[in-house]
Amino acid sequence: MAIAIGSLAASLSLRSARQDTLALLWRAKLSEAEAIARTKGPGQRFKSLALIREAMSLARPLGLTSPDELRLRNAAIAALCVPDFQLVREWNGWPADARALSFDASLTRYARADKAGNVSIRRVQDDAEEIALPGNGEVASIRLSPDGRYLLCGGTKHLVGGALTVWRLGPGKPAVVHRDRSLSAAFACFTPDSTKAVYASTARLSLLNLETGIVTTWQLPGEPDQGGVVMHPAGQQVACARSIGGKHVVEIRELEGGKTVATFTHPGACSSLAWHPEGGLLAVACEDEKCGIHLWDNPAKRKIAVWKGIRTLAFNFGSTPAASVCLARIGAASRMCGTSAQGRKFKAFP
């Protein structure tokens, strides 16, 4: 009897010690999550949420008090409110001879061009090659349509005209559906529904109907700026970077008729353009740090914010419920900045 009672007491003591250890562990994980969410660095959202999930899985069997539940909930809300990036898949998609990449909108297919202009169409899931297209011996710039069914191939002499080829990748055997002269693929884009392509030469803007093959062309004033041509998210307008009479401007043109509906003057050469996903805002950048990134309200035709003091080579534009977020690449590094929902002020994140 004494042995049985002693064994039971030892078991209860071990159980209590284990529960105390688990309680310390889940609280430690929660404290770490709360700290990471305030770092303004990588992992501030996704790593914090992962730690919170771990803390909850440890805490639930022990029983949660109301203050514990409130703290966990507040930590999750804080993590969900900050921007972050999460690595989903990583592979060697850039071999030694690769020179250009382009993905479809769903990130299920991508195109890769080598130094001889040969293009490999591949699946993101397993990096298996689906289609191989021959090059012409020269480096090519490429643009894959949002649905992954068309590929536009151009030269790499950014502001000098060269050969343009548009491929239909399926169904069936790949086929060339259009040839012309154009600037690089940075001066070409597709409508969101992948039914039309727009491309620019030094003096004209062309609209190609991919279903009928009909091309409509409009003359462009001045000379091209390296910011290229970017499609509006709704697919009804394009932004064109131009240099006209010594001034650097971005023209907003309607696809129906080619009419210029807005002209935004920029203090320096436009190197990158990006539309907000909702289409109301356009971010314009240049390589001169004195110029920076300028944010334009397209419907109101006015500038609403400027982010100066940085030399911007390329960027992307997204949004959260509370703010607009801009990812800028500076050399080999990337930085994130954002504006309030009203777009009044830029704030840089490390």
Image (cartoon, rainbow, N blue to C red):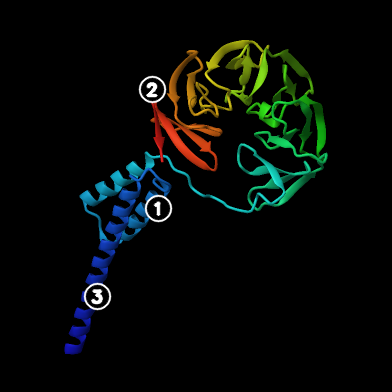
Which quarter of the picture shows residue 150? Answer: top right
Marks 3/1: CA–CA distance: 29 Å
Q: Position of residue 157 (x, y in %)?
A: 72, 31
**Other residues around mark 2 within 10 Å, as few (<14) / some (14–19) / many (≥20):** few
Which of pointers 3 and 1 indicates the residue nearer the eye? 1
Mark 1 surroundings: few (<14), some (14-19) or many (≥20) residues within 10 A = some
Amino acid of disc 2: Arg
Tell me the number on the disc at residue 50: 1
- Closer to us: mark 2 or mark 1? 2
User: Dot 1: what SS?
Assistant: helix
For the residue pair 164 and 121, the one nearer the viewer reads as 164
Residue 111 visible in the shown view:
no
Q: Is residue 81 left or right of residue 288?
A: left
Residue sitting at 29 percent across and 49 percent down?
A: 72
Q: Position of residue 159 (x, y in %)?
A: 70, 26
Lower position in the chain sequence, tag 2 or tag 1: 1
Q: Nearer the viewer, residue 203 or 105?
A: 203
Give the residue pinned by disc 2.
344
Residue denoted by label 3: 14
Task: Identify the disc placed on residue 109.
Answer: none
Which is more N-terminal, label 1 or label 3? 3
